[in-house]
Amino acid sequence: MENKEKYYNERVGFTSLGWLDVSPKNYRFMMEQMKENANKQSYFTLGSAIHCQVLEPEKFKERYAAIECSIPTGKKADAVRILASTRDYFSTPFDWHQNAIKKADLKGKIETLSEELINKEPYKSYLSSLIQLRGKEILDVDDAKTISRCYKNTISHKAANTLLYDNPFYTSNIKAYNEIKIDWKYPGYKGIIQSTIDRLIIDNSTKTIKIVDLKTTAKNVYDFEAAYKKYGYYRQAAIYMKSVLWLLNEKGYNINDYDIECYIVAVQSTGANECDVIKVSNNDLVQGVKEFEIQLERLTYHIENDLWEYPMEYYESDGIREVCIYE
């Protein structure tokens, strides 16, 4: 009973249900890892920076900064980063330098290494920049240019622009929201589902709801259908659709009066940083809902029985899987 309550209190969503698709043991492992890492520093990813620039430009300015000097690599660069983050913690320069050198596992005399890290290039300029920009995530010149091109390409693409950015001609009947986190319930599942919607547009004059998901990909953006199918992005869209309908119903909307549309804006983080817009078909949304319900059924089975070592089929059979690839 205690475990049931604990498991149902864990927020689940598209990503975590994907862990369950691998195996229930993987699901529990990843959920525990997520809890352990909850308070740890998140490391830079290009995709998250592009996401922030497009959807939360004010937060982007607060969170990120481009560094103009060359960024060194290796253990000495690690030592410089430690120096920048610990400057105020030591009473003497020697202790400050020694701490960074030891933590970076550098070998050699402290005095010699200190001289190189503090006064010689490229480490001197790198340290100065890190101290100046302390508290922000650092972008190198190439990453900053990539983010800028991605941002500009979403603006210049006529459909992406309409979906991602507020129109100055919006009337009071049109409401748009970015980065909405929804904790919601689904019939038949006792726990809480959590969805974060990149952008939601509600047009009360046309009775239309648009859900927009921004994706970055390193591959050809015009081949995005492969990732769409492989990673089940149609199912993600279906989950988001259900979460938004739940939210609006809670807020008193007559959701039967509204049409709902789901879009993916895909931006390529490599090459020319091209942009493409995909509309999720109604057929794919229906299929996505079916798969989502199956995932919740399987999760419920494992929670109710507190069985996580193997998939559900293992416990309901002799433990042998028959494989047939030719009929």
Image (cartoon, grey):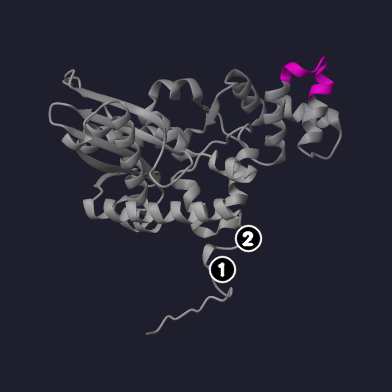
Query: On the image, numbered disc 1 is attached to which residue?
Result: 314
- In the foreground, 287 or 314: 314
Where the N terminus falls, by quadrant?
top right
Q: Which residue does the image show at 20% across and 38% down from the upper left?
A: 159
Callout 1 amino acid: Tyr
Q: Mark 2 or 1 closer to N-term?
A: 2
Residue 188 in percent (x, y) is at 41, 47
Q: Which stretch is magenta?
A: 87-96
Q: Is residue 237 left or right of residue 62?
A: left
Residue 167 in percent (x, y) is at 21, 24
Looking at the rendered structure, the secondary structure element under dot 2 is: loop
The dot on residue 21 is none
Callout 2: few (<14), some (14-19), or many (20+) C-alpha neighbours within 10 Å? some
Report if the CB atoms under discs 2 and 1 are less than 8 Å apart: yes
Query: On the image, numbered disc 2 is attached to which residue?
Result: 309
Q: Which residue does the image show at 37% across and 47% down from the upper left?
A: 236
Residue 47 in percent (x, y) is at 44, 40
Q: Is residue 291 visible?
A: yes
Q: What is the CA distance from the residue labelled 2 to the residue labelled 1?
A: 9 Å
Where the C terminus falls, by quadrant?
bottom left
Q: Residue furthest bottom?
A: 327
